Image (cartoon, rainbow, N blue to C red):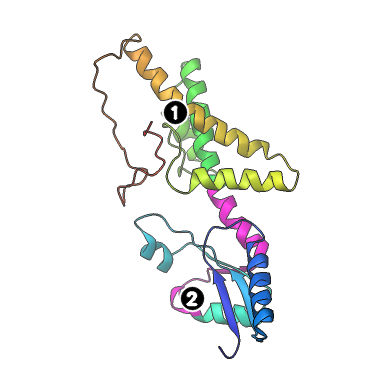
């Protein structure tokens, strides 16, 4: 290979991965006695399952983590067709970009656990959580996205990303109490579903057929990966 190369990490990876990738490549090049001008940058994807093309071409933002001006120019050229109408390319340092991906998913998971916590409280207080949801969602600072009570978050991203971020915090001797609570509420919410069923039938579930409405964790594709409705 000749000339400058940019190694772009698109995956959701622990903070510090780009540094380790850079070190690994440098060590291999040194062992081979080769020289290559390169940089490693983080460009995490924010794609929903079943909507990858739409989310890539019309994404709310494109995050690039790099300290290299050459990488910035390459990424500007790469994303040029998708930012003609609006500047959505965001440059930041590498570790900030890696953390942004985890933080975004953790924030959405937090909203889900929060509304489920409020729903459980509303039930005990005799309040209609749907009315509460509309009341708080009408505040533009909060919005309606991800504040629908249910049996918790699932899928292939939220559970693993919340756990990974909690684990990352532990590795730097920090207890992420909010993230632990988010995961705890989500775990408890699954049991809450069965408790509601038991109360509805006075504890007599023997021989009953229970239908699950909205089985997949997302509408498209019809995936059931780590869905909360799956025992």
Q: 35 or 201: which is nearer to us?
A: 35
Query: Front-most of 142 and 123?
Result: 123
* Part of the protein shown in magenta: 78-105
Residue 15 position within the rendered picture, expressed as x and y whole percent measured from the top left: 65, 57
Most extreme residue toward the right is 173
Distance between the Cα atoms at labels 2 and 1?
41 Å
Magenta-highlighted stretch: main secondary structure? helix
In the displayed structure, 27 sits above or below 146; it is below
Q: Position of residue 194 (x, y in %)?
A: 39, 21
Image coordinates for residue 82, horizontal then vertical, percent: 44, 73
Residue 1: image quadrant is bottom right
What residue sits right under mark 2 in the picture?
79
Q: Nearer the viewer, residue 129 or 230?
A: 230
Residue 65 falls in image quadrant: bottom right
Q: Secondary structure at mark 2?
A: helix
Marks 2 & 1, CB-CB < 8 Å contact: no
Which residue: 70% across, 43% down?
170
């Amino acid at each position: 290979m000749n000339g400058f190369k940019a190694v772009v990490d698109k995956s959701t990876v622990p903070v510090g991965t780009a540094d380790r990738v850079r070190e690994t490549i440098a060590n291999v090049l040194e062992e081979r006695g080769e020289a290559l001008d390169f940089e490693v940058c983080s460009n995490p994807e924010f794609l929903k399952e079943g909507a990858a093309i739409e989310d890539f071409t019309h994404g709310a933002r494109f995050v690039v983590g790099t300290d290299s001006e050459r990488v910035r120019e390459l990424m500007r050229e790469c994303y040029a067709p998708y930012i003609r109408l609006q500047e959505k390319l965001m440059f930041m340092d590498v570790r900030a970009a890696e953390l942004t991906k985890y933080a975004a998913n953790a924030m959405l998971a937090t909203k889900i656990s929060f509304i489920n916590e409020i729903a459980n409280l509303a039930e005990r207080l005799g309040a209609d959580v749907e009315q509460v949801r509309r009341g708080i969602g009408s505040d533009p600072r909060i919005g309606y996205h991800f504040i629908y009570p249910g049996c918790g978050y699932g899928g292939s991203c939220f559970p693993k990303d919340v756990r990974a971020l909690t684990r990352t915090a532990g590795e730097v001797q920090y207890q992420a109490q909010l993230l632990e609570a988010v995961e705890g509420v989500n775990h408890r919410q699954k049991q809450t579903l069965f408790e509601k069923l038991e109360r509805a039938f006075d504890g007599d579930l023997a021989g009953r057929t229970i239908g699950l409405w909205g089985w997949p964790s997302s509408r498209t594709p019809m995936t059931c990966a780590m869905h909360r409705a799956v025992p």
